[in-house]
Image: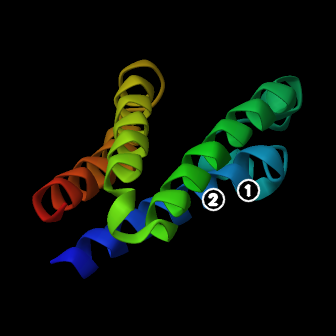
Amino acid sequence: MKILANAMVGLVALLHVYILVLEMFLWDKPAGQRAFRMTAEQASATKVLAANQGLYNGFLAAGLLWGLALGAGGTPVKLFFLGCVFVAGVYGGVTAYRKILYIQALPAALAFALVWLTG
């Protein structure tokens, strides 16, 4: 069960690395425009804001990886950063795109529950 919990934390971290890449480097490229349903004009106008968002997603990933690297002592760190991911996912799902609830908040909630239960 602990392995599953850590695997879920790792998957959430990898998801946020992927989001970092999309927002910081691919925002105004076809992949970024497709992912976020934007025109080239919208992407160009919001590129700097997206890069900032991407940086924050990178910090979330770094925190989760840090928690994993700490081993058994990393449970509080993992819970904190999973909580941050969950809150960001709920906020994004309510204010931007509903699918963020399923892509970001749900995996974070599942990982949080697994870490909590095995912590």
> Which residue is depicted at the point 32% across and 46% down?
79
Task: Tell me the amino acid under the disc marked 2.
Answer: Val
- Placement of the C terminus among the 4 image quadrants: bottom left
> Which residue is depicted at the point 63% across and 59% down?
17
Task: Tell me the amino acid under the disc marked 1.
Answer: Val
> Which residue is depicted at the point 84% across and 37% down?
40
Colouring method of the image? rainbow
Q: Quadrant of residue 93?
A: top left
Badge 1 marks a residue whose secondary structure is helix
Q: Label 2 neighbourhood size at 10 Å, few (<14), some (14-19), many (20+)?
A: many
- Horizontal side of residue 51 vs 19, given as left or right: right
Q: Position of residue 29 (x, y in %)?
A: 84, 52
Mark 1–mark 2 Cα distance, whole angstroms, equals 6 Å
Residue assigned mark 1: 21
The answer to whether 78 is drawn above or below residue 4 in the figure is above
Q: Nearer the viewer, residue 58 or 93?
A: 58
Badge 2 marks a residue whose secondary structure is helix
Q: Nearer the viewer, residue 115 or 11?
A: 115
- Horizontal side of residue 29 vs 35, given as left or right: right
Q: Position of residue 90 (x, y in %)?
A: 34, 29
The answer to whether 24 is drawn above or below residue 5 in the figure is above
Residue assigned mark 2: 17
CB contact under 8 Å: marks 1 and 2: yes
Q: How many marks?
A: 2
> Which residue is depicted at the point 54% across and 59% down?
66
- Placement of the N terminus among the 4 image quadrants: bottom left
Outermost left residue: 117
- Horizontal side of residue 115 vs 14, given as left or right: left
Outermost front residue: 73
Q: Quadrant of residue 44?
A: top right
